[in-house]
Image (cartoon, rainbow, N blue to C red):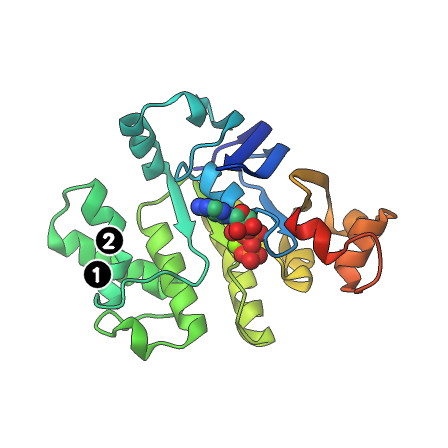
């Protein structure tokens, strides 16, 4: 159950601020593509456009055969059922139990008997290593557990594509490794297409099939981790090595 994504000449402006200028990206069915970029480079904005949560100013986003830009609000809402989103900072509802958080999308989109919801939540929580945590509140969870609840929630509706926003940020290396492993396992078991945005270079180079680099409103390169690592582009090299000196200046991130 997976779908192809094709982004063509995607532009996004908020007020007079241009965030994305002409993003081009193709993700094949079942592929894991990670988009790296500086803080503030527009990664979350790009992901929100892909997930149909933000309307781009120009360009096309094809999810399978559907061009999101051409859809009405109602039709867009319908398309969102095919997509799972793991939000930056997990974005759980603090007053709702783990169970209610996981089945939130299911309750919203489908009328299912409670027993079925229970069974789905139990299966998804088990899949992310959190069996039996249904009654806990988000405040009782560690950061890594919250991220995994977010993943269980995104998977509850059996999406064809999952969008991950900074899935490993704020986690220790072992916790981050666990999430990486989960993302790959979910893809291997369900064939789901996965798009990750992140600034965690080490994590992304380890497990993505291809890595893109978003810079100055464009995808500057998109290639296998090995080729990205070996790229001679000075901007890419500076980013990967985290050097303060080079073509990237703080000014270029806020222009
Ligand atoms: N709704 C909005 N209104 C105005 N500006 C916005 C809005 N959303 C995002 N921006 C601006 O667009 C730029 C890109 O933001 P975005 O959150 O997409 O970046 P990011 O790459 O995800 O950053 P981070 O790595 O810190 O999560 C930022 O400069 C931000 O201030
Ligand atoms: Mg972000």
Q: Position of residue 214 (x, y in %)?
A: 66, 45
Q: Residue 121 occupies which quadrant of the picture?
A: bottom left
Which residue is at a point 64% across and 57% down the rendered structure image?
A: 204
Which residue is at a point 88% across and 48% down the rendered structure image?
A: 232
Camera-nearest residue between 21 and 241: 21
Q: Position of residue 110 (x, y in %)?
A: 19, 41
**Helix, strand or loop status at disc 2:** helix
Q: Is residue 49 visible?
A: yes
Q: In this view, does 205 lie above or below 63?
A: below
Is 70 situated left or right of 249 in this image? left
Is 76 situated left or right of 23 in this image? left
Crowding at dot 2, Cα within 10 Å, few <14 / some 14-19 / many 20+, comes out as some
Crowding at dot 1, Cα within 10 Å, few <14 / some 14-19 / many 20+, comes out as many
Camera-nearest residue between 4 and 118: 4
Please report contact status of discs 1 and 2: CB closer than 8 Å, yes or no. Answer: yes
Q: Position of residue 129 (x, y in %)?
A: 40, 69
The quarter of the picture where the N terminus appears is top left
Residue underneath mark 1: 100
Residue underneath mark 2: 104
Which residue is at a point 30% across and 26% down the rendered structure image?
A: 75
**Helix, strand or loop status at disc 1:** helix
């Amino acid at each position: 159950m997976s779908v192809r994504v094709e982004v063509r000449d995607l532009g996004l402006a908020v007020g007079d601020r241009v965030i994305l200028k002409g993003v081009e990206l193709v993700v094949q069915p079942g592929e894991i593509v990670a988009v790296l970029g500086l803080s503030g480079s527009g990664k979350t904005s790009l992901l929100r456009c892909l997930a149909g949560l933000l309307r781009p100013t120009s360009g096309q986003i094809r999810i399978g055969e559907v061009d999101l830009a051409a859809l009405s609000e109602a039709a867009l809402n319908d398309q969102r059922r095919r997509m799972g989103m793991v939000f930056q900072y997990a974005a759980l509802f603090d007053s709702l139990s783990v169970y209610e958080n996981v089945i939130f999308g299911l309750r919203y989109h489908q009328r299912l008997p409670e027993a079925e919801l229970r069974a789905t939540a139990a299966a998804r929580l088990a899949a992310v290593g959190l069996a039996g945590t249904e009654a806990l509140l988000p405040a009782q969870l560690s950061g890594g557990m919250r991220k995994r609840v977010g993943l269980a929630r995104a998977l509850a509706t059996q999406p064809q594509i999952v969008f991950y926003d900074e899935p490993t940020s704020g986690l220790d290396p072992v916790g981050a490794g666990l999430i990486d492993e989960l993302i790959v396992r979910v893809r291997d078991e369900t064939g789901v297409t996965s798009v990750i945005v992140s600034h965690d270079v080490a994590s992304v180079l380890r497990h993505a099939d291809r890595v893109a680099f978003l810079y100055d409103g464009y995808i500057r390169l998109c290639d296998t981790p090995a080729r990205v690592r070996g790229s001679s582009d000075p901007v890419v090299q500076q980013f990967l090595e985290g050097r303060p000196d080079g073509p990237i200046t703080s000014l270029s991130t806020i222009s």
